[in-house]
Image (cartoon, grey):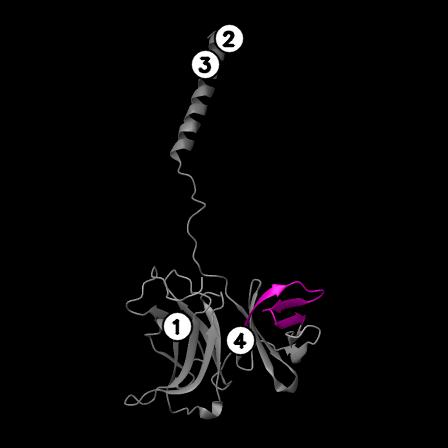
Amino acid sequence: MTTRNATTMAAFVVFASIATSMATAQETPPVDSAAPKSHRMPMMQRFSYNCDRGTKVVVFLRERNARVSFQGKTYAMKQVDAASGTRYSEGSIVWWSKGEEAFLEDDTKAGEPVRLAENCKLERARSATADSGVVAGTVAYRERMAMPENALLTIQLLDVSRADAPAEVIAEQKFMFAGHQVPLPFEVHYDPAKIDPKRSYALSARITVNAQLIFLNTTAYPVITQGNPAKVDMVLQMVEGQTKSSPIEGSKQ
């Protein structure tokens, strides 16, 4: 083979390789970077603080959002700038923490802050047990839909021992979604003196919007006595007649 023919053959091989690569690239479907993602958000982290005068503050954190519970009230807060430490606010109520110390403050009156809870110390994590006076867990549902800010989660601890009588409410806790989504962590505090080891207890959960029932549990979640746990992960079912595409009347978007 002459030098000219060898050069022509090499050029042909290179051209054929480039053409084959282009054809293969055209046949490979592009990756859809806009694929829908689940609305579920990262799990909240829970922190408990013991404060002066025997008060307690429970804080749930998720990214730059905080849900602060104190004396039966829950405040939905956003992280704001702070000279030091970490500061969350809902406009007038402020939660500030640094290291393992924190305080809750009412800044309604400019220049006249009122400490609601002070000298708060972070409580070391401990598991919920049958004699701890608290039942804990998470609430979720399988539908891919988000709840509006005014959606209300109600958890009840019930005495379900008698099949021929309505369940007795031992304790109840309510949580406003306030922009958060499932899975939502919860704690229900109860008086251990009201618990009889011989009786049966269970958790009930429901989600409402403007008093309209959207989700509830249709599965029993026994707790505390007779070998049952003090921590459960509840999955709720959508109420018949509701659809995930239907607007929720009067809800805030």
Q: Residue 160 magenta-drawn?
A: no
Residue type at mark 3?
A: Met
Dot 4 or dot 3, earlier in sequence: 3
Tell me the quarter of the picture where residue 220 sits.
bottom left
Q: In front of the other: label 3 or label 1?
A: 1
Dot 3 or dot 1, earlier in sequence: 3
Secondary structure beneath dot 2 equals: helix
Secondary structure beneath dot 3 equals: helix
Look at mark 4 in the image and give the residue it sits on.
74
Q: What residue lies at 43% left-to-right and 70% top-to-bottom? A: 151
Task: Give the extent of the magenta segment.
Answer: 74-99
Q: In front of the other: label 2 or label 1?
A: 1
Tell me the quarter of the picture where residue 29 sits.
top left
Residue type at mark 2?
A: Thr
Whether residue 149 sits left or right of residue 218 in the image: it is: right
Residue type at mark 4?
A: Thr
Look at mark 3 in the image and give the residue it sits on.
9
The disc label shown at residue 3, or none: 2
